[in-house]
Image (cartoon, grey):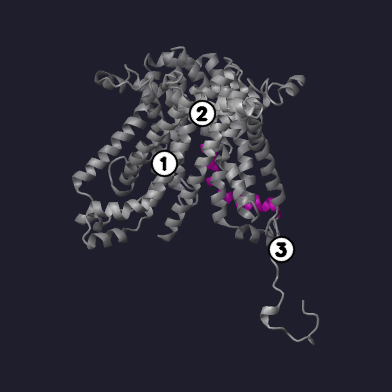
Amino acid sequence: MALGKPRKEARVASLTESPAMRAGLIGLALVFILAFIVLPLLAVFTEALRNGFGAYLTAIEDPVALAAVKLTFIAAGISVPLNLVFGIAASWAIAKFDFRGKSVLITFIDLPFSVSPVIAGLIYMLLFGAQGLMGPFLQSMDVQIIFAVPGIVLATIFVTFPFVARELIPLMQEQGTEEEEAARSLGASGWQTFWRVTLPNIKWGLLYGVLLCNARAMGEFGAVSVVSGHIRGMTNTMPLHVEILYNEYNMVAAFAVASLLASLAVVTLIAKGILEWRYEHELAAIPR
Amino acid sequence: MVASTAIAVPPLGEYPQPRARFRWREPSVLPGFGLTLGFTLTYLSLIVLLPLAALVLKSLELSWDQMWEAATSARALAAYRLSFGAALLAGIVNLFFGVLVAWVLVRYHFPFKRLIDGLVDLPFALPTAVAGIALATLYAPNGWVGSLLDPLGIKVAYTPSGVVIALIFIGLPFVVRTVQPVLQDLNKDVEEAAASLGAGRWQTFRRIIFPSIMPAALTGFALAFARALGEYGSVIFIAGNLPMKSEIAPLLIIIKLEQYDYAGAATIGVTMLIVSFLLLLPINILQRWTRQRAGEN
């Protein structure tokens, strides 16, 4: 989002606002950002360190908190690679070929974004829960999905479903098929074409999508909350653990775990910013 | 098609035109169509489509009257009203401030502009539960902001206004990010022409700039509104969650589930889904309109 240098003619009186107006508008925008973005972020870290660094560490090193961290990594570790493979497959089919029903397919892929996270959890509950459509069958097979890790993973996959595909589709559509066709005509196999031609072209866009997908996977609350059952040390991810600690008025511990998630968000934003700045050209097709 | 040169060549129009044969896909030399589309459709069906079908099936377990009752009980209606009202209010606030922030970021230069630009995306990246507890703590009567408002008799946390605050936070990036690229691509020539014809700055904004960014701003508003309707994590901590008063629709689904009223939960879920889909339509039309206008420039 780099802008050129301020152009001289922009200073002509009726082509821009008066300095006072400009300062006022900038001030108002900054106050809004400060109140709604900076303050909440500051509050997380301030509250976490309220009783000093020792209390902060104790809260994080609590075995239940560590179990939540581990489960969060498991959920993201399964759902992100799956959605990554899906994203590549879907964007290959959509961007490299012309077929009927493509726009319907794209709409369906975007569907999880327009569904409330609570409904995302609800649908798996209705499918796999004890009273769900497949509940009796799962019980007879002695398989537990709801209130267990598989349900958490499924809900996470659902809410992060479109992330990678949605970044890759416009990128690959813009790149077209000429390079791949050239590779094929020179005798490259399908896989060779993908690994040597397509993947190098999309790698930064892919990383961009994975970054956003991972941030959401680790931070998802609503969907996971419905299917988790909130069993301490067993089915609590980090955001769910934050909720439990907060509702127990254990503020320092709640904000300590929350600060880990907030740090993840900040790191994600920084990495995203670096990608956008360094590879602006390669990522130009991605709507931001 | 031409059997022999002896046959007189008919005038061009009488040649049988090659009929466009119905094809599911255009031919291509690239491999992997079957594999990737097959995987895409299977994965999409298993993760998204079949579970969503289960939601509809489950709500159909109720008779029409029961369904209507579950979807329109006084408590459910109050929850929809709050969800809609708060999402609308937050959307309007974000529409105004989103355009302002986008304007300031595109047109002016000031210190830490890049940082501010990056921070706009924080609501996308920050887990909703973290945002929820942070906002609840800030706006509680003894919090940084709450303690300033409390003497004025303004209560935000644990009231419906708290819901609006959380939804403003969640929806903040949408309008900024849809308006920003349009403002950047806006042709300065038109503004210069307006100025040279004697238009004042406000007139130029109202007649030239505002109509150009309006579709994008409305798209951002609609996206923020749709997101706000389903939002759960950031709202429940600051809302207070009193039935009929500060209880949002997604929370009502969770409460029904906790009472083992699966069909009732499904019914409210389906109602919310229908509303979301009805919203998607104008969003898509708006986005197409925005793109077309952008193409014209």
C-alpha span from label 2 to label 3: 49 Å
> Residue A21 location in percent, x, y?
21, 45
Residue B255 visible at all = yes
Residue A76 visible at all = no
Q: Residue beneath label 1, please?
A: B221
> Residue A283 location in percent, x, y?
49, 49
Q: Residue beneath label 3, please?
A: B21
Q: Residue beneath label 2, please?
A: A219
Number of marks in the image?
Answer: 3
Q: Amino acid at mark 3?
A: Arg
Q: Is residue B4 magenta?
A: no
Q: Amino acid at mark 2?
A: Gly
Secondary structure found at label 3: loop
Magenta span main SS: helix
Q: Which residues are magenta?
A: A189-213
Secondary structure found at label 1: helix
Asked which quadrant contains residue A274, the reply is: top left
Q: Are marks 1 and 2 in contact (CB under 8 Å)?
A: no
